[in-house]
Amino acid sequence: METDKGVVLATERYGSAESWKYVSKDGVMERRRDGSEGHSGGNSVFGVFKSVFLPQGYPESVSDDYLQYQFWDTMQAFSSSLSGTLATQASLRGVGVGNQEATVAAATVTWLLKDGTGMLGRILFAWQKGLFADVLNDIAMFMEILAPYFPACFTFIVCTAGIFKSIVGVAGGATRAALTVHQARRDNMADISAKDGSQETLVNLAGLLVSLILIPLVTDNPVLTLCLFFLFTVLHLFANYKAVRSVVMETFNEARLSIVLQQYLKDKRILSPPEANQREPVFFEFGQTVPIKLGVRLQEIAQSPEDLELALKENSMPYLLGVRNGCVCVCLGPEASVSDEIRAMCQAVVLGNMLSSSNSREATGAAPKQQKGHWEMVHKSHKLMDAIFNPLLKGAEAAGWDMKRTLIDWDEWRVEWKTKSS
């Protein structure tokens, strides 16, 4: 390509940013910006902002839902920061700041008890996972705002609020880690996490500046304090809901896999990740008609050698299924692959459907007869999965689901069983 300005030898682009071209003119190679030169100042400012607050290679290096999620996450963090300012002011007043009769020792003991119970809560609830974390956070801040008006119970109230906040911290850290893995399209988890920290710092700085304006207004004005708190809380919860709804996870958990499977059993249509994510509950856990336990001990399925033989009948998979106390139990072998885990979960859902349908049609009979019927349903579910699982697996992969890993919550029991030689 030859122009009056020279011959274009090559062009280059940094991610999705502006492009440059190398031009040969009079035997010299020059590097020039491709496009209008008039926007260089604006581009430079935007480039600095992008490099500081967005992951390198954005938007190609992150998931499609990254920007929408981060926007709503920023909104909820900003409103939570303002609510936290109101709660902190109330807590400081409660421990005696501004009160000439309060002693330093009493205030210190109260604050240490508050922090200590929060640490204890982090230890006790490190295993907890829930969708009510941010609701608990708002409840904790509301308790801190009300605490100064109940001086006799002040220490108890702020300690309870500290425990609630500790649960929020643990749950928030766990969900943030899962989202970072989801958003990283180039295994750039560290960069995304670092930029998320930069965004959070910017939001907290903005919240600090607004707080400097709010504090003089709300001091000694409990009505305005409560009105602003409820306003920020509504904004916080709304933004949080929108943030969660904007996420489109392409990996299966129990809820998403059940939703996709039930639709497939209904009309042979496989839902795409956006469709399944929209059907997944936000505030409550996805409820199965029959409870399912994954990764149980062998005795949850087989209480005798005859039970084990029945569990192995017509089963060549590295997992066992059974029914106990109205619950579908799945026992996993150590060699089970991700595909086997997905199949086991699907079969558990199918078995649960059969069990639910059977319970609605038949009255409870004798225990041996009922147990025999359960094993017949297990064997029937094996045959059904042999027929539908491979088409389901291929269809799910074609629909955009990530079949290399899952978020299915298996317990850690793994069992090796012996089979009779043929």
Image: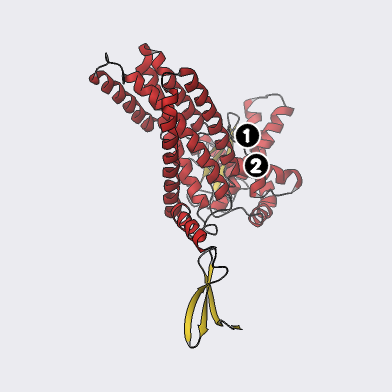
Disc 2 target residue: 278
The residue positioned farthest toward the bottom in the image shown = 27
Residue 303 appears in the rendering: no
- Image coordinates of residue 228 in percent, x first then y, are 51, 26
The foreground one among 396 and 188 is: 188
What is the quadrant of the C terminus in the image?
bottom right
The residue positioned farthest toward the right in the image shown = 267
Residue 54 appears in the rendering: yes
The foreground one among 198 and 386 is: 198
- Image coordinates of residue 381 in percent, x first then y, are 66, 43
Residue 65 is left or right of residue 165, and the answer is: right
The foreground one among 86 and 241 is: 86
Q: Are marks 2 and 1 in contact (CB under 8 Å)?
A: no
Amino acid type, callout 1? Gln
Element at label 1: loop
Disc on res. 288: 1
Question: Which residue is painted at 41% across and 26% down in the image?
Answer: 216
The foreground one among 62 and 108 is: 108
- Image coordinates of residue 210 in percent, x first then y, are 45, 35
- Image coordinates of residue 322 in percent, x first then y, are 58, 37
Disc on res. 93: none
Q: CA distance from mark 2 to mark 1?
A: 18 Å
